[in-house]
Amino acid sequence: SGQRINHFEDTIKLGNEKKWFKDGDKVVRVREVQLLRDVRTRDSVFLIGYRFLELRLPLDRFISVTRELEHLKMTPAEWSRLEDIVFVLGLPHAVQITLNAEKTPTLGSVIPQFELFMTLLEELGKATPSLKEITDVGILWATKYYSRMDNSRAYAVAIALTLHEYDIQFV
């Protein structure tokens, strides 16, 4: 509701002023931002989770003082799991940021980045057993999309066009 949104915003402002938010013994200043609403975009779950983690301290405070929301307070284990999920979701986000940095990303650069992403997921799952369940879901989806690309001649055509664009001759 609008009142809860205002109350939450006030919690952040007042918490910063009164130095309520601490990480151990260190006082933390929390950005005065709102929680994100779900939208259908490529990174929406990552961005929502990331913002939720950013607002952990004021959320805990807000929920603790709002009796009808007390049952929603997350345990340390739940916060940790959310951190894991957001970390894994950050991998495709980082790949997308890398591709966005290119003036004109081509399929020839997208596929190696996609393969790197899949390799990172596999290695992360092997190295960190607590993340394996999450990375396995990512690998499942990535494999599905990769097989769609693999069954297409678009990659070969894209490479040929890229080579032609840069006037690279086959020897």
Image: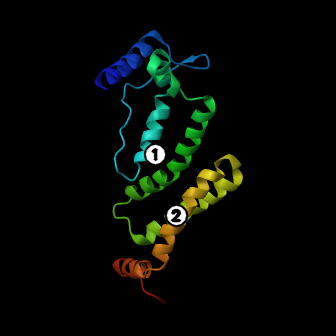
Q: Percent from the top left, x then y, of residue 64?
A: 50, 18
Q: Residue furthest top?
A: 18
Q: Percent from the top left, x then y, of residue 33?
A: 36, 28
- Residue type of the residue flagged with mark 1: Phe
Question: At x 48% / y 12%, what residue is drawn?
Answer: 19
Q: Residue furthest left?
A: 2
* Residue 135 higher or lower than 60, as above or below: below
Query: Can you identify the residue that label 2 sits on?
Result: 142
Indicate the colouring scheme: rainbow
Disc 2 is placed on an element classified as: helix
- Picture quarter containing residue 17? top left
Question: At x 38% / y 69%, what residue is drawn?
Answer: 106
* Residue 123 higher or lower than 167, as above or below: above
Question: At x 50% / y 21%, what residue is drawn?
Answer: 70
**Front-most of residues 69 and 108:** 69
* Residue 112 higher or lower than 38, as above or below: below
Question: At x 59% / y 35%, what residue is drawn?
Answer: 78
Disc ID at residue 89: none
* Residue 83 higher or lower than 112, as above or below: above
Separation of residues labelled 1 and 2 (CA atoms): 16 Å
Q: Local crowd at mark 2 within 10 Å, few (<14), some, or many (≥20)?
A: some
Quadrant the N terminus occupies: top left
Would you say residue 62 is visible in this rendering? Answer: no
Q: Percent from the top left, x then y, of residue 161?
A: 36, 80
Q: Residue furthest bottom?
A: 171
Would you say residue 69 is visible in this rendering? Answer: yes
Q: Percent from the top left, x then y, of residue 108?
A: 44, 72
Query: Can you identify the residue that label 1 sits on?
Result: 46
- Residue type of the residue flagged with mark 2: Ala
Disc 1 is placed on an element classified as: helix
Q: Local crowd at mark 1 within 10 Å, few (<14), some, or many (≥20)?
A: some
Q: Of the residues under marks 1 and 2, which one precedes in the sequence?
A: 1
